[in-house]
Image (cartoon, rainbow, N blue to C red):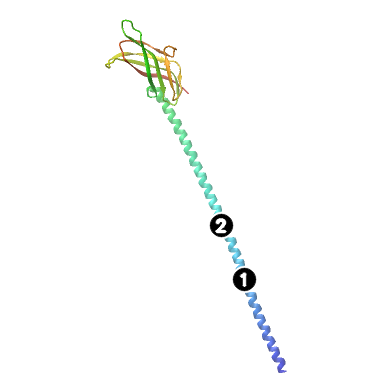
């Protein structure tokens, strides 16, 4: 009878120990599962945060590109407006004061006198420094002596056009240059442009 009770007690202790071990194993497994679930949630959260950060960076980059494009377009428009305004200003200045943009060179003349000296333009080269083509140039030629004395001036006109930035030579022989004749032993001809037609 004593032996049976002892055996039963031993079995009870073993059973209790197994229960305790089982309970500890289940708790450890639950803790492991909780850690796994927590780690998975953290990974998901980190992934979502990384995705949100990438989306924010992408939106910020798009805004920067849009702002840069708008700034570039505004600069181009401002430049075009300034260029257009500059052309308007120069066109008005060219019409009002053609001498600022037209430069005469290689001026040639003939002496038509037999007893007295008479001067008349034979040829002139004109450079158009403006941004506009011009035609029908006209002005005055002043005749000056070797000592600086001024004999007077006569009108002249040029037939033909000069493109913007180009140089053109006009001659009396081909009819593109017409000028008056002045009496005097002049040595220099000073060209002044008074009128010009602007070709738009």
Where residue 160 is drawn, which disc sits there? none
When the figure is inspected, residue 59 is found, relative to residue 183, above or below; the finding is below
Mark 2 or mark 1, earlier in chain: 1
User: Whole-percent x and y of residue 144?
Assistant: 30, 15
Secondary structure of the residue carrying tag 1 is helix
Find residue 39 and report its image quarter: bottom right
Which residue position holds label 2?
A: 50
Which residue position holds label 1?
A: 32
At horizontal 38% and vertical 20% (from top left) the residue drawn is 105
At horizontal 62% and vertical 71% (from top left) the residue drawn is 32
User: Whole-percent x and y of residue 147?
Assistant: 26, 16
In the image, 72 versus 165, the foreground residue is: 165
User: Whole-percent x and y of residue 114?
Assistant: 33, 5
Badge 1: residue crowd in 10 Å (few <14, some 14–19, many ≥20)? few
At horizontal 42% and vertical 19% (from top left) the residue drawn is 196
Find residue 87 and report its image quarter: top left
Q: Are marks 2 and 1 in contact (CB under 8 Å)?
A: no
What's the CA distance linking mark 2 and mark 1?
26 Å
When the figure is inspected, residue 161 is found, relative to residue 62, above or below; the finding is above
In the image, 92 versus 145, the foreground residue is: 145
Name the residue at the bottom extreme: 1
Badge 2: residue crowd in 10 Å (few <14, some 14–19, many ≥20)? few
Name the residue at the top extreme: 115
Secondary structure of the residue carrying tag 2 is helix
Locate the N terminus by quadrant. bottom right
Find residue 155 and report its image quarter: top left
User: Whole-percent x and y of residue 12?
Assistant: 68, 86
When the figure is inspected, residue 55 is found, relative to residue 183, above or below; the finding is below
């Amino acid at each position: 009878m004593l032996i049976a009770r002892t055996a039963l007690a031993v079995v009870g202790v073993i059973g209790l120990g197994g229960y305790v071990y089982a309970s500890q194993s289940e708790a450890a497994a639950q803790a492991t599962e909780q850690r796994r679930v927590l780690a998975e949630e953290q990974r998901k959260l980190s992934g979502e945060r990384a995705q949100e950060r990438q989306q924010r960076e992408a939106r910020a980059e798009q805004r920067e590109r849009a702002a840069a494009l708008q700034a570039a377009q505004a600069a181009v428009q401002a430049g075009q407006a300034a260029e257009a305004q500059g052309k308007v200003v120069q066109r008005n200045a060219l019409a009002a004061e053609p001498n600022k943009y037209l430069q005469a060179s290689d001026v040639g003349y003939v002496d038509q006198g037999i007893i007295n000296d008479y001067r008349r333009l034979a040829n002139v080269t004109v450079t158009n420094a403006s941004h506009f083509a011009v035609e029908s140039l006209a002005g005055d030629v002043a005749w000056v002596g070797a000592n600086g004395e001024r004999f007077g001036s006569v009108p002249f006109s040029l037939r033909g056009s000069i493109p913007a930035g180009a140089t053109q030579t006009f001659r009396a022989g081909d009819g593109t240059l017409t000028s008056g004749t002045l009496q005097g032993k002049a040595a220099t001809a000073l060209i002044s442009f008074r009128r010009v037609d602007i070709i738009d």
